[in-house]
């Protein structure tokens, strides 16, 4: 039991350490739109034409790095639909 708790605490500290490092190496902006800044950026008092943010979201925003793949396979969906449409092979995100 004690070993499992130590492993959980250890993984928590590792996650906090990696998140704090990403904040230390982030670019910092003031009164900018999140769409106009690069990935891994912190924006204080972010501006948005379509969204009114209040509370903490109105004071600071963070734009993370996207480490995801640009396409998603729809083969499991084709299997469930019974291959009705053979033209669907992959869907690409812009």
Image (cartoon, rainbow, N blue to C red):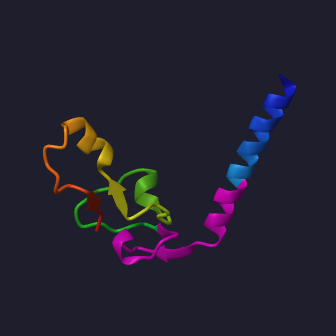
x, y percentage for residue 10? 79, 43
Q: Residue furthest left?
A: 84
In the rendered image of this protein, does residue 3 appear above or below residue 21? above
x, y percentage for residue 14? 74, 51
Left or right: where 88 falls relative to 35: left
Q: Quadrant of the N terminus?
A: top right
Residue beneath the point at 39% across and 74% down: 32
Residue 32 versus residue 81: which sits nearer the camera? 81
Residue 76 versus residue 56: which sits nearer the camera? 76
Figure disc tally: 0
x, y percentage for residue 68? 45, 60
Q: Quadrant of residue 11?
A: top right
Left or right: where 46 falls relative to 9: left
**Magenta stretch: residue 87 in it?**
no
In the rendered image of this protein, does residue 5 appear above or below residue 56? above
Q: Quadrant of residue 92?
A: bottom left
Left or right: where 68 falls relative to 24: left
Left or right: where 82 falls relative to 17: left
x, y percentage for residue 34? 38, 69
Q: Quadrant of the C terminus?
A: bottom left
Residue beneath the point at 40% across and 58% down: 58
Residue 72 versus residue 49: which sits nearer the camera? 72
In the rendered image of this protein, does residue 87 appear above or below residue 46? above
State the extent of the magenta-drawn residues as a range: 17-43
Q: Residue furthest right?
A: 2
Residue beneath the point at 29% across and 50% down: 74
């Amino acid at each position: 039991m004690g070993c499992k708790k130590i492993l959980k605490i250890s993984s928590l500290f590792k996650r906090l350490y990696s998140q704090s490092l990403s904040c230390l190496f982030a670019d910092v902006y003031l009164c900018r739109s999140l769409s106009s800044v690069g990935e891994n950026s912190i924006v204080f008092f972010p501006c948005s034409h379509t969204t009114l943010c209040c509370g903490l979201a109105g004071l600071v925003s963070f734009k993370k790095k996207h480490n995801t793949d640009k396409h998603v396979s729809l083969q499991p969906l084709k299997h469930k639909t019974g291959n009705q449409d053979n033209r669907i092979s992959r869907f690409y995100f812009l």
